[in-house]
Amino acid sequence: MDSDQHSGLTAWKRRQHAARRFSPLDCGCPDPWPCRCSLPPLSDKMIDAGRDAALHVLAVGQVPLLEVEVLQALWRRGGEDRELAELLYTLTDGAIA
């Protein structure tokens, strides 16, 4: 096994080559794998679930990583949800999922 295969560079190159074979999607994205354009918008239930999961993980002494969309939605809500979003952002040093 050469160093390219071991490092994952070969797999990345194969993925890029495969992406070039696809025609662009309707949204304009060239590759369906990372495209998130067609995902439905977050519902209040999904945001509440992210908040509740984060609170549970914090309660057991771990730091959760939320998706950026959930974190932004919590921040936009204001109040305690905004405080939680800011706390999570601080605890993770700005890392997001």
Image (tube, rainbow, N blue to C red):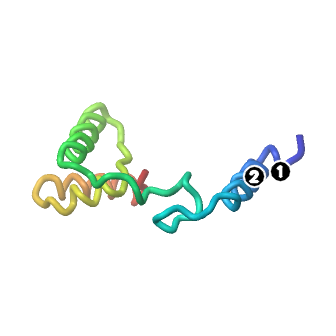
Q: Residue at x 21, y 52 (%)?
A: 84
Which residue is more in the foreground, 84 or 10?
Answer: 10
Q: Earlier in the sequence, mark 2 or mark 1?
A: 1
* Image coordinates for residue 55, horizontal then vertical, percent: 23, 39
Q: Residue at x 74, y 58 (%)?
A: 17
Which residue is more in the foreground, 30 or 58?
Answer: 30
Q: Amino acid at mark 1?
A: Asp
Q: Quadrant of the N terminus?
A: top right
Cα gap from disc 2 to disc 1, whole angstroms: 12 Å
Q: Which residue is mark 1?
A: 4
Q: Residue at x 83, y 51 (%)?
A: 4
Task: Say if 24 sits above or below 74 in the image.
Answer: below
In this view, which residue lies farthest toward the bottom? 28
Q: Which residue is mark 2?
A: 14
In this view, which residue lies farthest toward the right? 2
Task: Say if 93 sits above or below 57 in the image.
Answer: below
Quadrant hosting residue 64? top left
Secondary structure under the numbered disc 1 in the rendered image: helix
